[in-house]
């Protein structure tokens, strides 16, 4: 482990680390995500584009090359967080130089360097208490409750840690939509099915016929659609509000 963690080139370049140590050949957009140096990033990417693999590699890289790091995995359900944690374990198992683990269970692991990767439950009242977090990965973010998202953000306040949201869209609602649409200081990457050579045109044609345009456009083309249960479109509400005259107070009530 010392030989790997002391490699300055791998420390500085996660793409090189992923290629040489994990046998992962990144797509151009994945290279950009792996070399992300900011504090906030959103991956608005289609299904099976490889966004979960990228996030797992980011978690592994942080844990290996930055001692005492705390990485949290958040999802809409504990089962989904567990699936992302399995991806982390799969990437770790590829390493030619295995790091020694002082804790290793179904939901978390800790290395001898004191770095930890923890998969958390999906309810706001069960995750409080963590502080000094270095990286939070929020998987399927469009389906994560806003209360949970807002509860994890203060964990980064003192540490200056990083926040990664990854998902396909799920309607024009919630923090994932709002941050993608209006958020500032975010690194934003969008990858549709046509940007991913691993997804065939034939498969997409079959999916469009099977699941309908509402799901198809969001799952494979990163489009935020009006929510199914919405009576009024967002654009109609905004237009209506912009036409409302402000109330005037004061003056003669009989004018």
Image (cartoon, rainbow, N blue to C red):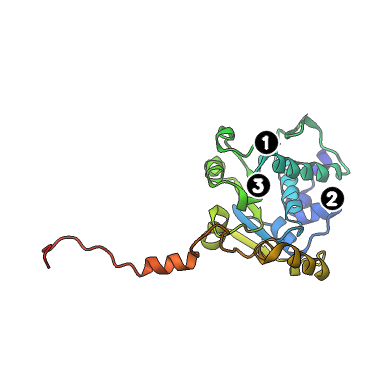
Q: Is disc 3 surrounded by few (<14), some (14 to 19) or many (20+) residues within 10 Å?
A: many
Residue at point 37% right, 68% down? 242
Percent x, y of residue 220: 71, 64
Classify the position of the N terminus by image quarter: top right
Q: Is residue 150 left or right of residue 53?
A: left
- Callout 2: helix, strand or loop? helix
Q: Which mark is residue 9?
A: none
**How far apart are the two marked residues, 2 and 1, measured between alpha carbons?**
22 Å
Mark 2 and mark 1 lie on one chain; the one further toward the N terminus is 2
Location of mark 2 (residue): 22
Q: Nearer the viewer, mark 2 or mark 1?
A: 2
Q: Is disc 1 surrounded by few (<14), some (14 to 19) or many (20+) residues within 10 Å?
A: some
**How far apart are the two marked residues, 3 and 1, measured between alpha carbons?**
17 Å
Location of mark 1 (residue): 68
Is there any visible trace of residue 6 in the rendered image? no
Residue at point 78% right, 67% down? 204
Residue at point 77% right, 58% down? 48
Q: Which mark is residue 137?
A: 3
**How far apart are the two marked residues, 3 and 2, measured between alpha carbons?**
20 Å
Name above or below for residue 206 compared with residue 119: below
């Amino acid at each position: 482990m010392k030989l790997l963690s002391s490699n300055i080139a791998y420390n500085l370049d996660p793409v090189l680390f992923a290629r040489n140590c994990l046998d992962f050949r990144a797509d151009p957009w994945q290279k950009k995500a792996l070399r992300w140096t900011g504090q906030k990033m959103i991956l608005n990417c289609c299904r099976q584009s490889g966004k979960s693999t990228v996030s797992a590699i980011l978690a592994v890289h942080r844990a290996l090359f930055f001692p005492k790091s705390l990485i949290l995995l958040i999802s809409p359900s504990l089962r989904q967080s567990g699936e992302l944690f399995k991806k982390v374990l799969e990437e770790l198992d590829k390493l030619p130089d295995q790091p020694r683990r002082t804790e290793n269970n179904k939901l978390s692991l800790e290395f001898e360097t004191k770095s930890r990767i923890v998969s958390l439950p999906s309810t706001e009242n069960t995750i409080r208490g963590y502080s000094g977090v270095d990286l939070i990965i929020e998987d399927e973010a469009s389906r994560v409750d806003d209360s949970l998202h807002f509860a994890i953000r203060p964990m980064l306040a003192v540490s200056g840690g990083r926040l990664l949201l990854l998902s396909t869209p799920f309607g024009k609602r919630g923090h994932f939509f709002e941050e993608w649409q209006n958020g500032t200081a975010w690194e934003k990457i969008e990858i549709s099915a046509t940007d991913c050579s691993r997804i065939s045109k034939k498969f997409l044609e079959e999916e469009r016929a099977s699941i309908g345009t509402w799901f198809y456009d969001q799952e494979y083309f990163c489009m935020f659609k009006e929510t199914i249960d919405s009576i009024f479109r967002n654009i109609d509400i905004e237009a209506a509000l912009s036409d409302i005259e402000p109330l005037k107070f004061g003056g003669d009530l009989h004018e």
